[in-house]
Image (spheres, helix red, strand yellow):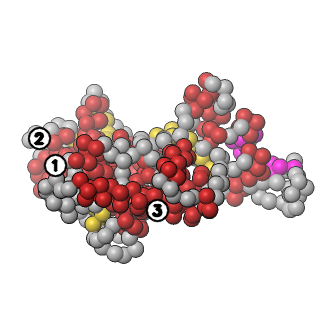
Amino acid sequence: MITKTIQFIEPDRQQAQQVIQVLEQAGYQVDYLTSGKAGLQSRQAAITLVSSALPDMSLTEWVRYSQTVADTQQRRIAIAIVDQHEGLLAAEAMKAGATDYLLKPFEPSQLLSLIARVEALQKPMSDIVAESWRSKQILQLAHRAACTHASVLITGESGTGKEVLARYVHQQSPRSKMPFVAVNCAAIPESMLEAVLFGHVKGAFTGATGSQSGKFEEANGGTILLDEIAEMSPALQAKLLRVLQEREVERVGSHKTIKLDIRVIAATNKDLRVAVQEGVFREDLYYRLDVLPLHWPPLRERPEDILPLADYFIDKYQQGSACQLSGDAQQMMMQYHWPGNIRELENVIQRALVMRHGDFVTAQDLMLPVDSSKIQAIKPEYMPASAGSAGTEQGHIGAKKQAEYQYVLDVLKQHEGNRTLTAKALGVTTRALRYKLAAMREQGIDISQIGSAA
């Protein structure tokens, strides 16, 4: 058995002894130090407990510097230990890069539980990129939620990755080996949603030629994600509430109940409290779902995630060829506000990989609609420093616009003219797509043969 080492930095040896005893009894080896500089020089442990009473530097300085000198193969995990009245300092430490914090005095069980959560976060996460302190905080909360059986409500703008976060909760939970079933309540016609969720028996309605299990049954023992929960009709909300209260379900057309052992995760891009006030969402269902709330901030509020996410999607789509973002592309991506969030970023990278002409994705390859003042500040590496001719500049703009139009056409063809699916794939609203298609028609581009499905 390999003994895990935890670094502990605490100048008060008497207080430190109590913590060391708890850790050693739990099977950890402790690398005990009394100063911040000594802690930075030591590389024996991946997890560090660091006191706010450092004699040679502030807690936030230590955390910030520990991240800049961290080994790229093993990122240093810092847990700040602060006094009860130092809540603001704890928040500053989190912003500086700390993974979590403990308020003194604390129970041994609190310490060991926190370390267990942090260790779980060190496991490889193939679908989640979280470099900003806000993202790390959300993952900490998600891991705490995963350890319970309570319902979870995930909120956030469209494209922020709510389903990815729901899968993370499931994967970190005791139900991880059981099914995870996701249902988009907005994508299924209201007349069919009840049968999809709860199942039906033969003859329950026209076309029901046989019995069919519902998504709740399929997820039994595991987790069900009800995405876009705000789009559910009031009548179906009442039936869902009964399922959650009784932990049993009846197939449509049947009076036989099926017992459920299931965790429910709901997700929405709307404020359900406002929906309750407006009378379009049941208050009792809201409180049944909002036991453990998680909010994914929009990408513009966690800019530290932008470039790591871009690198993740480049690795995902480049299919083995060497490729990376150029300096001007990185600058442009950091200046863009990303209204479509991660979904838009993924689509931009996928498109840029098609448009690039070498081993670098340039700012022009991204085709982002940024302000002209920002575009002028970013010179592609292959363009001369001088202004150049107006004709050449217009040629670049024209080629870029034609490439953009061709990409829209290609995506439209892939979805057989379906505007809704095309807009989703492009990471834009259907209204924005309509404007784009109208502009293309004005340029003489014929899209009629592709169809006009909604």
Count the marks: 3
Q: Residue at x 47, y 53 (%)?
A: 443
Of circles 2 and 1, the one toward us is 1
Q: In this view, does 151 lie to the left or right of 353?
A: right
| Horizontal and vertical percent position of residue 345 | 40, 54
Magenta-colored span: 239-253
Residue type, numbered disc 2: Met
> Callout 1 environment at 10 Å: few (<14), some (14 to 19), or many (20+)?
some
Q: In this view, does 62 lie to the left or right of 354?
A: left
- Between 188 and 133, the one lying in front of the other is 188
Q: Residue furthest top?
A: 277
| Marks 3 and 2 close (CB-CB < 8 Å) | no
Q: Which residue lies furthest to the right in this view?
A: 203
SS at circle 3: helix
Tell me the residue that label 2 is attached to. 57
Q: Quadrant of the N terminus?
A: bottom left
Tell me the residue that label 1 is attached to. 65
Q: Is residue 375 visible?
A: yes
Tell me the residue that label 3 is attached to. 406
Q: Which residue is drawn at 77% across and 58% down?
A: 213
